[in-house]
Each structure stands twice: as structure tokens, then as C-alpha cells.
Image: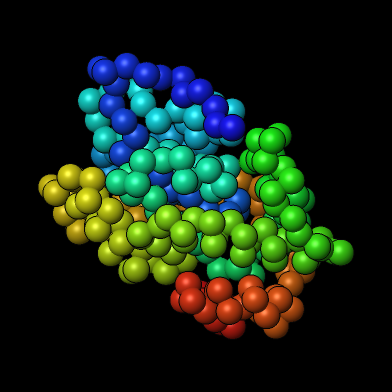
Amino acid sequence: MGVTSKNKAENKRRIDFVVCGVPRSGTNYISAVMNKLGCECGHEDWLQKDSWCTERETDDVWGDVNWHCAPYLYELPKDIPVVLIVRHPVNVINSLLATGDYKRWRNALRKEDEGYFFFNCKTKEEEANWFWRCWNNLILSRSSIVLPIDRPEELKSNLAILLYILGKNKTYASKVSKVVDSTKKLHSRGPHPEIVTWWRLEKETRKLARELGYGRVLD
């Protein structure tokens, strides 16, 4: 069963884009970048499991960066761009483990859907690996653009493509490059110890990481 949208009115603008990824992948950073590039971009503001808001009063291009919405992306109209934000899995998984966020996937599920997410993990490392793979695969099933925050040139190029799709044709590549370079990456919970290395990632995690352009050497 879905939830009732907060907003159903003809004078409201439908959401223009959604950026989604695993927690600790740079969601704060991408939200700040999108705002500087002229898009109204929230950070976990509009697409929570029980407050699914896809229309609001604004004349500007707007969207949300939100990891919670991955299980429910299928509820979005198919013409809304869904963007995957990624970061090297070694860094993400170490951060998930250090902060305890590897368990947060449960918080994104509506009560009636909790039984659909079965996993057989005996350790926190296994659960963190599973979370990283599960969330990325959910988003990839809807995503047309990938934003790798630790590969700056690819990030700039794909941001420019997203802005073009959103009708921001006057946001030139030079501005995108300047904004990406000048926006400080936020490590809101500080540096984390290395708990896992590339070869301690599960085989399935390394396989998906390679498909997303990552390898043994951290960028």
C-alpha cells in the first residue's frame, strides 16, 4: 500500500529530479552542488517513506537528494530523471561500519514492506556489504545517470548532462567545473578507521564496484 502525497493541486510543480545513493556517499555534497548550479535541491526533505511529496509550489527546477527513497523509486513517474550517486565502496562501507549506519536501511522501509527485504547476514560486515549492493542495484534499475563524487571529471561531465536534461542549458561546463571544485566535501561524522579493504569486500560487492568503475586502488 502506498502513501498519500502531501500535495495534489494543479498549480504545483512536479519534482524534476531525484538523486539517490547509499548513506555516506556524499548526499550533502551533491545537494550543495545542485543548489549552487541553480536547482532547488533538498537533502532528505521530500521523499521519506511516509511523507512522499512529489509536487510543491515553486516555479524553479527542484529535486531531492535522498537515500531513503531507493525502495520506492518505482512510484515515481517514469519520465522523472533518477540519478545514482556513488563513492568507492571501501570508503562507504568503512563509514557505514564506523557510524553504525549499516543498519539504517530498515528505517527506509514502510511497515508493510519490511518482510520483502530478506537477507542472511551473520556479521555487521556482511550486512554493510549487502546494504551497499542492495541499494545501488535498486537505484540502478531506475537510474540513467551516475554521479561518482570521487571521480571529479566524470562527475562534472555527468552533472552537465543532468542539467541539460533539466533544461538548464545556460549552465555551461565551466560553471559546473568551478562549482564542483569549490564546493567542500562534507564529512559530517569525521574520518573513519579502515575496517575493510578491497580484498575484504565480498566478491559480489567487488563485482558491482567494478561495474561502477571502481577497483582496488582508492581514487
List x then y, in percent, for residue 113.
67, 41
Q: Is residue 55 above or below residue 89?
A: above
Q: Residue at x 35, y 46 (%)?
A: 78
Image-quadrant location for residue 195: bottom right
Which of the two residues, 71 or 185, is positioned nearer the viewer here?
71
Which of the two residues, 30 or 47, is positioned nearer the viewer here?
47
For the N terminus, the image quarter is top right
Image-quadrant location for residue 2: top right
Q: Residue at x 28, y 26 (%)?
A: 13
List x then y, in percent, for residue 82.
39, 50
Lateral position of residue 61 relative to residue 217, left or right: left
Q: Residue extending furthest front?
A: 1
List x then y, in percent, for residue 39.
29, 38
List x then y, in percent, for residue 178.
28, 55
Image-quadrant location for residue 102: bottom right
Q: Residue at x 49, y 56 (%)?
A: 139
Asked whether residue 26 is in view, the answer is no
Asked whether residue 209 is in view, the answer is yes
